[in-house]
Amino acid sequence: MTRFDVILGKNVVKKEKNKLKLILEEDEDLLKSIEQGMKENNIKSAEVTSINGFLKKGLISSKEEGKKNISEIEIIKANGKFKFGGEDLWGKLEIFSGGKKPLSGQLLIGIATEGLEIIMEY
């Protein structure tokens, strides 16, 4: 089960955005965890600012290569915006991987390894 840590922004000069940290377990769906985290914390609109960890497997879409299956990749950078429209979650997540052959593109399906962390601002 995904663990949620709400981190409140604190700044005297200007109010920082609140942050939500999602820590995923082995074989959890990354996009469904984002949706669950937003629902359980009553967040209507959020932005993914970083993801640290590895994807066990998934599917990305890129302009260069079209749709591509991926496995065992480290995510070094990610960004995306999500918003609820009624009961449906709308948005997309762009990821960038490390390694000898870096990949980038929109994540369509992503299954996490143990401990993958997602930081969201809202």
Image (cartoon, grey):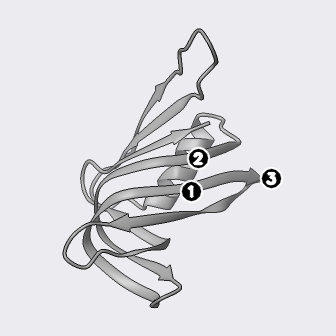
Q: Which residue is at the far bottom?
A: 65
Name the mark nearer the viewer: 2 or 3.
Answer: 2
Looking at the picture, which amino acid does disc 1 mark? Gly
Q: Tag 3: Cα neighbours inside 10 Å, few (<14), some, or many (≥20)?
A: few
Q: CA distance from mark 3 to mark 1?
A: 19 Å
Residue name at image x 39 percent, y 44 percent:
2
Residue occupied by mark 2: 47
Q: Is residue 77 above or below residue 63?
A: above
Check contact, mark 2 vs mark 1: CB within 8 A. Answer: yes
Q: Decide which of tag 3 and tag 1 comes sooner along the chain.
A: 1
Residue most extreme to the front: 13
Q: Secondary structure at mark 2?
A: strand
Quadrant of the snapshot with the C terminus: top right
Q: Secondary structure at mark 3?
A: loop
- Circle 1 sits on which residue? 80
Marks 2 and 3, how far apart at CA: 18 Å
Q: Residues within 10 Å of mark 2 (few under 14, many from 20)?
A: some
Q: Amino acid at mark 2?
A: Glu
Cα–Cα gap, marks 2 and 1:
6 Å
* Residue at horizontal 61 percent and vertical 12 percent from the top: 13
Please tell me in which quadrant of the rendered image residue 102 appears.
Answer: bottom left
Mark 1 Cα shell of 10 Å, populated few (<14), some (14-19), many (≥20): some
- Name which residue type carries label 3: Gly
In the shown orientation, is residue 122 left or right of residue 10? right
Q: Position of residue 31 (x, y in %)?
A: 50, 60
Q: Relative to residue 61, is residue 41 drawn left or right?
A: right
Q: Nearer the viewer, residue 104 or 23?
A: 104
Check disc 3 and report the residue beneath it: 86
